[in-house]
Amino acid sequence: MKKATRKRKAKVKARRRGALRVAVWRFSLFLSGVFLGVSIPWLAWLDYRVTGEFEGRKWDLPSRVYARPLSIYSGRAMTAQDLLSELDASGYRQLSGAGVAGTYDRSGGQFRVHRRSFTFDDAPEPALELEIRLGAAGVTSVRRLDTGEAIDLERLDPAEIASIYPLHEEDRTLVSIAQVPDLLITGLQAVEDRQFKHHPGIDLRGIGRALLANIRAGKAVQGGSTLTQQLVKNYFLSSERTLVRKLNEAAMSLLLEWHYDKPEILEAYINEVYLGQQGSHGIHGFARASEFYFATPLAQLQPHQVALLVGMVKGASLYNPRRNPERALERRNQVLEVFAETGLLTATAKEQWQQRPLGVTRRPGASANRYPAFIDLVKRQLRKVYREEDLRNRGLRIFTTLSPSDQARAEVAVKSGMEDLAARGLPESLQAAMVLADVSSGEIRGLVGDASPGRAGFNRALDARRQVGSVIKPLVYLVALEHDSDFNLLTPIEDEPIELRQPDGSLWAPKNYDGKSRGRVRLVDALTGSLNLATVRLGMRLGVQHLVAKLEQLGVEAHVEPVPATLLGAVELTPMEVAQAYQSIAAGGFTVPLRSVTAVQTPEGRTLQRYPLRMLPLERRDSIAVLNYALTRVVTEGTARNLSQLMGSDVRVAGKTGTTNERRDSWFVGYSRDRLAVTWVGRDDNGPAGVTGSNAAMRLWARLFSGLPAESVSLDMPEGAYWTWVELDPDARSDASCEGAVQWPFVSGSEPKSESPCLARLERSERKSFWRKWFDR
Amino acid sequence: MIDSRFWWVVLLGLLLSACTSPQPAPVEEREVTRRVRAPASEESAGVQVYPLQNPAVVQLMEQADDAERSGDYATAAVLLERALRIRPRDPEILQHMAEVKLQMDDFEQALSFAVRSYDIGPRVGEICARNWRTISVARDHLGDAGGSREAEQRAGQCMNTRPPSL
């Protein structure tokens, strides 16, 4: 009985135990179900958030804008100063030995340049060590350093002149990992996360080490966060320090590492990390910080500067070098110590760098927009084809025409020129603009929109619409030369007072600059002397509507009224429009739209758009060629005759001065065979400024061209025009062998009708000799 | 039953057509050769009036030639534009560009470049003949038959030692 009850009890127990086991099993199944049911969606949610953030930032790529690449070949005219200015713009550092891509070394006229690999707009080219020798006239030889072979043609990777940013990140300067100095990449890992290459997103050993250190110190002195965790923390900035948050962070880090490779994560980190504050804007990313603290591009930082930025990761405001310089210095030297410990710097180098001051600029550097006027032009050209958001987000590669060395010369010319004008007693409040273009290709090489060339804002080169004054006169004479039965350069015209009824009914009586009238003058002298009376009389005879049509034909889109005052330049044009009109003339009658962009590519280097060279020949290129000669005489005999002396060169250039009423505007347009520049000087409020074409704008122009390699304007005549010998007063056709004969260019059919006595004699004797030959046979 | 060899032939045909369809016309059959280069070279009998090039330009011109032969006219145009940045007033580069534009069916620009080459070029010899023959072909395509014939005649006068207007 007892036995039986015991047995039964045991059975019940066993059954109960079984039930319990089942219950426990069921419960744990339930729990894990709940766990999975919660954690899987939770993880999926975290995954969605973190990859969304990462992808969003990753693909919000700014467009990169490149200058034109510098072609290097033997015979290229360029100075050492120009080469240095190109190397500097392309971010090359001077380094003895030049063993690293992106560096150069120089001794005298011999440069060793380690060209970076780069995907140009037509083809990728590998890194290459070059030796470039410069003589007085330019490049004398180019060699590859590895094989010693002479090279016919190479090019430097172009300067990155701007980035067009996603709107919400206007204050950023993003870099790709390839542009980051090695010391920053390795040093950052040495200081913040030595296991970065190996851990899966979190570093358990690191956490353990930090925990131990913190327990030993009795407070939190070390963090065990990996770079990945820090990146995640930066994405979802919050000072909350709860366990859930920590777990979320760890999970997101693992997920990030699962989706992306290490370089991608490091690149994101380098562009994301918080390194300071400017007003309401955070300073994010090392590249922007480099500009903000050192006013230097990231690629050009020296080791002690890299160390400071790496040190600031730990606490951007604690180690702010402007506010807490001592603490920052201490931290920087600590970091240099770590660099040396981990073999990134030698002990001696470390000590040298530790001696250096912080090297921080006093005022925060602006984000790099070194060429505000030109970039403005680039954006305007691109906006005709691309939507604003495509420019900002798609990481386009934009190839432009800017020549960094020419632009540097233009900026110096404007800056030093304006100082010079102030020293000559002209008002301080003067403003200026300059356009520099290639004559044949229409490519803009330099653009200045402000008397302080680096200043962004009102872009006078494109937007200052001002009266052009005498700059318009050559077009009146061009129209005259097209009437080849009536006019040639020597035709006498009247420089006499004239009164004209204006459209508003008032009388208009123009005067010459000196108030005098000269009676009969030759057409060419009226142009070179910029005589108002002669020009108005000539223009009225021809019809003002022809001048308006001519402007339109030369590519000026602005509306111009066909009123008499237009003949003297009462027409408001921008420096860019003036440059466009003169491009056609300088190129002998081939109109090429002025361009700043040559190609647009995807980030991978696929070409989306090309803007090739296109030209349109004008009908009357014969009269343009004759006009070109007359404009060289403006410089040799006319209102610009001081120019050669100011330039310090006897290269033959052509040009025209322009002054407006009450000396409000000063213009100069001039060109050598291959380059054209327009300069304008005046006041923003359009007030009297005391300027004339030759006392202000021409001086800036001369400063620019005194340093540019320039070739003389070609005086060859195209078909339909030719050079011939004439005798003057009375004008008659003559011959080279006749006394007093001079050579002038004429549109065929416009030459003097009569023969000089000397020419007549010659022709008679020639005819005789012809018959003699005939009979002598 | 169809012989299995039939399918091989079909397959081979398909493969060959896949290979050959993007191939440009053989150089000697192209319009630019027939109507511009060959006759100009024949008429001039080797009279060349332009000076030798600098090596940088020669390199680019050779690359442009290669690109043109393989039918990659866009690349040829880019290379010639680079050459023009070095020598903006070189009649030979300008004429070469005109011929490339002709093959791109960009007749307006072919005309422009040929005119520019003629304007600043020697106006005699082979290059002059190529200038006018390009102008003639371009005008023809642009529907200007009279202008085309006139240009053709001008090409014939290029072998006079001096251009007619001088």
Image (spheres, coloured by chain):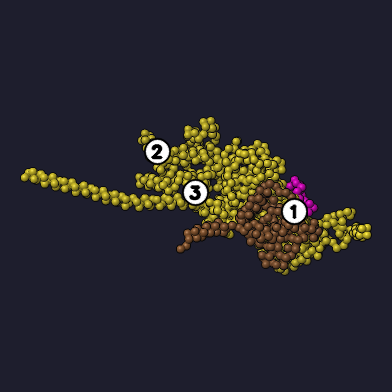
Q: Are marks 1 and 2 on the same chain?
A: no
Q: Colour of chain B?
A: brown
Question: Residue A138, position in %: x, y?
Answer: 69, 43
Quadrant of res B155: bottom right
Mark 1 — residue? B46
Disc 3 versus disc 1: nearer the observer: 1
What's the residue at 71%, 54% (across, down)? B91
Q: Is residue A65 left or right of residue A650?
A: left
Q: Work out whether residue A223 can be spotted.
A: yes
- How dense is the environment of label 2, judged by Cα within 10 Å: few (below 14), some, or many (20 and up)? some
Q: Is residue A414 left or right of residue A650?
A: left
Q: Is residue A132 above or below residue A694?
A: above
Mark 2 — residue? A206
Question: Residue A611, position in %: x, y?
Answer: 61, 56
What's the residue at 44%, 38% (across, down)? A194
- How dense is the environment of label 3, judged by Cα within 10 Å: few (below 14), some, or many (20 and up)? few
Q: Is residue A435 left or right of residue A628?
A: left
Q: Nearer the viewer, residue A166 or A114?
A: A114
Mark 3 — residue? A281
Dot 3 amino acid type: His
Which region of the structure is painted magenta? Answer: A633-655
Dot 2 amino acid type: Gly
Q: Is residue A636 magenta?
A: yes
Disc 1 versus disc 2: nearer the observer: 1
Q: What's the distance in space between the residues labelled 3 and 2, CA to CA? A: 33 Å
